[in-house]
Amino acid sequence: MSADSEKLETGRRKLAWARAHMPVHAELRERYGTDRPFAGVTVGVCSHVEAKTGVLIETLAAAGAEVIFTGSEPGSSQDDVVAALNEQQGITGYARRGATKAELDTFHRQALDHGPNLILDDAAELTARLVHERPDLLPGLKGVCEQTTTGVQRIQAMLREGMVGFPAYAVNDTPMKHEFDNVHGTGESSLTNLMLTTNLLLAGKQVVVAGYGDCGLGVAQKARAWGAQVTVTEIEPRKALRAHMAGFRVTSMEEAARYGEVFVTATGNRDVIRVEHFAQMRDGALLANAGHFNVEIDARALADVAESVTEARPGIVEYRMSDGRRLHLVAEGRLVNLATPTAMGHPVEVMDQTFAMQFMAAQHLLEHGAALTPGMQRVPDEVDRQVAEIKLQTLGVTIDALTESQRHFLDTWRLEEILGA
Ligand code: NAI
């Protein structure tokens, strides 16, 4: 078997495994595969191109879309999956693992050349580029569905500058996305990949989690469940209090830098761990990032202050300080759950939900987008609820329904009615 056909075969197998564990997508293909509501619509998908994203892409194609895909991050796409998607009808993609910044730019431009009518985005990569570089495409754009926190923030920033003349659904902000994907997906996959890459033990270690939003909360909770001593750093007083009352030690990065053994950033911000912190750290400290961009740990400053920089293991770079301390940066400070050599991203079942939200939000946008005001919009609650219902159905979980008297009880403000007079 040639290297190319072997790659194709591996990609097909990865897609088949993901498909088999994404029952919500199977249901969506069943529901929308005949009516094909996306027929005649070009959908641009920008995400980490691995098997779960592949199943979303296949589902969109099954629902009639012409799908154009590209990677949202240089280290997270998988070439075998890219090949196995590109052989399918109605799907064209531009992505490569380890793409340089210039290559990724070219891939995004090639994707935009297809003139997408809808964009399913990750960190507003395609959206920002379309607005910035291809305003000629704006008339054909019906809307955007954004799947991550950083992307929602970027679109809001664009909105403040009056640059969003189309509806954009904040899919990240739906309960079915962020309460599961950010918390459980990021929590489990970041720690799993970190420990697989290092082959070290988490139990008993001092783990410092920067940021106690949905992702940080997930990482902190799971690390504690694995037996780690967890510290949280925050800049937002209520989040800090929440972490404190969940039983975590809360302190500044300046303080935590002195005793932490494993650091995981999940803030969506930059320079959270920087030169003054590196100066305090213990020998052997592990530094990893779970936030979208590789700027949470100031890797440039780390390289500047290091006496030598070597590869310690695949996916881990060792920075040796002049006093002999060694600091270990995982995946170049890129998404630890996606950019390490063996990374596979979020667990399949979580992405079944997240991508079902992207699909359903896109379908809703297609149907109702013309009536929406341009700008960032909340995905209607009924769409979120619908995906939750499908998910429960696939799990075989039954829930109660409101009785008439309960519905009435919840709907009324008159005391005599509430008391059943
Ligand atoms: P969030 O907004 O819920 O939480 C971020 C938290 O970080 C906030 O509580 C904020 O106060 C805190 N923060 C900001 N600057 C800080 C600083 N300098 N020091 C300490 N804390 C700071 O955001 P969420 O949903 O937790 O996402 C965080 C990042 O993770 C985003 O970039 C998001 O796109 C990304 N993400 C990554 C995933 C992955 O697969 N690794 C999955 C989902 C989101």
Image (cartoon, grey):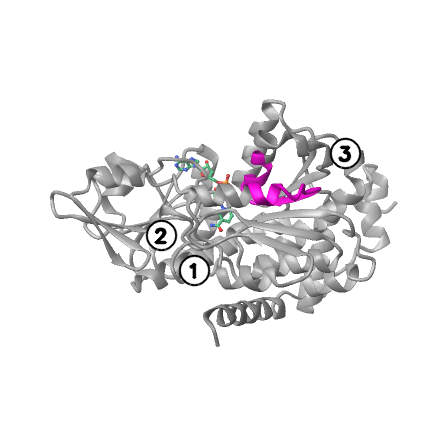
Residue 352 colored in magenta in the image: no
Vertical side of 194 occupied by 245: above or below? above
Q: Residues within 10 Å of mark 3 (few under 14, many from 20)?
A: some
Name the element at disc 3: loop
Helix, strand, or loop for circle 1? loop
Mark 2–mark 3 Cα distance, whole angstroms, equals: 41 Å
Q: CA distance from mark 1 to mark 2?
A: 10 Å
Residue at disc 1, CB closer than 8 Å to ligand 1: no
Residue 126 falls within the magenta-colored stretch: yes
Task: Tell me how far mark 3 sits from mark 1, CA to CA.
Answer: 39 Å
Q: Which residue is mark 1?
A: 343
The residue shown at (43%, 52%) is: 75
| Magenta residues (range) | 109-129
The answer to whether mark 1 and mark 2 are in CB contact below 8 A is yes
Q: Amino acid at mark 1?
A: Ala
Q: Is residue 292 visible?
A: no
Q: What is the x, y in percent for residue 255?
A: 27, 38
Q: Earlier in the sequence, mark 1 or mark 2?
A: 2
Left or right of 43? Residue 46 is: left
Residue pushed farthest right? 421
Which mark's residue is nearer the viewer, 2 or 3? 2
Mark positioned earlier in the residue sequence (2 or 3): 2
The residue pinned by badge 2 equals: 331
Position of residue 135 measured from the top left corner of the image (x, y, whole percent)? 64, 30
Residue type, numbered disc 3:
Leu
Which residue is under mark 3?
372
Q: Earlier in the sequence, mark 3 or mark 1?
A: 1
